[in-house]
Amino acid sequence: EDQVTQSPEALRLQEGESSSLNCSYTVSGLRGLFWYRQDPGKGPEFLFTLYSAGEEKEKERLKATLTKKESFLHITAPKPEDSATYLCAVQAEETSGSRLTFGEGTQLTVNP
Amino acid sequence: NAGVTQTPKFQVLKTGQSMTLQCAQDMNHNSMYWYRQDPGMGLRLIYYSASEGTTDKGEVPNGYNVSRLNKREFSLRLESAAPSQTSVYFCASDPGNTGELFFGEGSRLTVL
């Protein structure tokens, strides 16, 4: 059974204070690892896809990295508008369609 | 460009009542999904349709039925609602097996 565990559950940062979110996973053959952002009362919004260990993707203040067992979402010099819940998900090789297994998310709050 | 549209946004039901959640996408995507999101449980897949004319069970299908009406529309039906089905329901779509899901804004269902 595929599993995704995210830590911490919640993180409070001051504006400009860099940090990282963790996503640990177990999957029977990884097709892809995905990061999504979810704002309160909204649906998740796709951020990144990572396919293989060592891969990195960047978007503005966010950088996602992948190893064989976990992924990190690094947030550099965050701003209050980065406050959201960040979700990690995995897709196994043998699945049909985009059957993703999601973690519970990390709720990030960035104070001005 | 509306993306993924869900109706209704809010609904209150009594135990035993039935209802249908509607979802439509205007991106010409092949695959569509229904997820539920509960505190402490993350997003869990209920049913999905990899392509028009096909539907498959996800992780938590009991108590639900789906219909892929055409390429644009994918509905979720609760035949006899139970309090355990109180949740936020998200419809999503993707071009086909990419893992890069486009989500609707959610339907908040309360079963009394």
Image (tube, coloured by chain):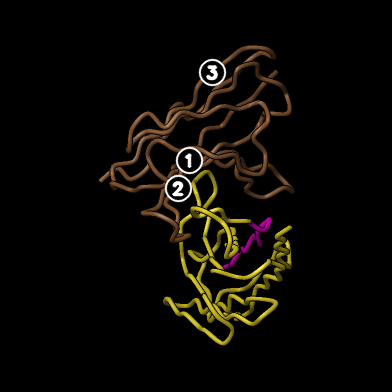
Chain colours: A yellow, B brown
B65, A89: nearer the viewer: B65
Q: What amino acid is at disc 3?
A: Met
Q: Give the structural element (helix, strand or loop) at label 3.
A: strand
Please rate how many residues cluster around mark 2, counting C-alpha atoms within 10 Å: few if below 14, some from 14 to 19, many from 20: many
The question of residue A106 being in magenta is answered with: yes
Which chain contains the residue that carries disc 1? B
Magenta range is A102-112
Q: Chain of mark 3?
A: B
Mark 3–mark 1 distance (CA, rounded to whole Å): 16 Å
Q: Amino acid at mark 1?
A: Cys
Judging by the rendered image, the residue that carries numbered circle 3 is B19
Q: Nearer the viewer, residue B10 or A109?
A: B10
Specify the farthest residue to the bottom: A54
In the image, taking residue B46 as reference, residue B41 lies left or right, namely right
* Circle 2/circle 1 CB separation < 8 Å: yes
| Residue designated by label 1 | B91
**Is residue A86 among the parts visible in the rendering?**
no
Residue at x 70%, y 65% (from the top left corner): A6
Using the image, determine if residue A49 lies above or below residue B64: below
Residue found 42% across the figure and 51% down from its top: B102
Mark before the other along the chain sequence, 3 or 2: 3
Give the quarter of the figure containing the N terminus of chain A: bottom right
Q: x, y (%) of residue A8?
A: 73, 67
Query: Do the residues at discs 2 and 1 belong to one chain?
Result: yes
The answer to whether A3 is drawn above or below residue B24 in the figure is below
Q: Which label's residue is closer to the chain start, 2 or 1? A: 1
The reply to whether the magenta stretch includes residue B105 is no
- Return the mark for residue B103: 2
Q: Which quarter shows the C terminus of chain A?
A: bottom right
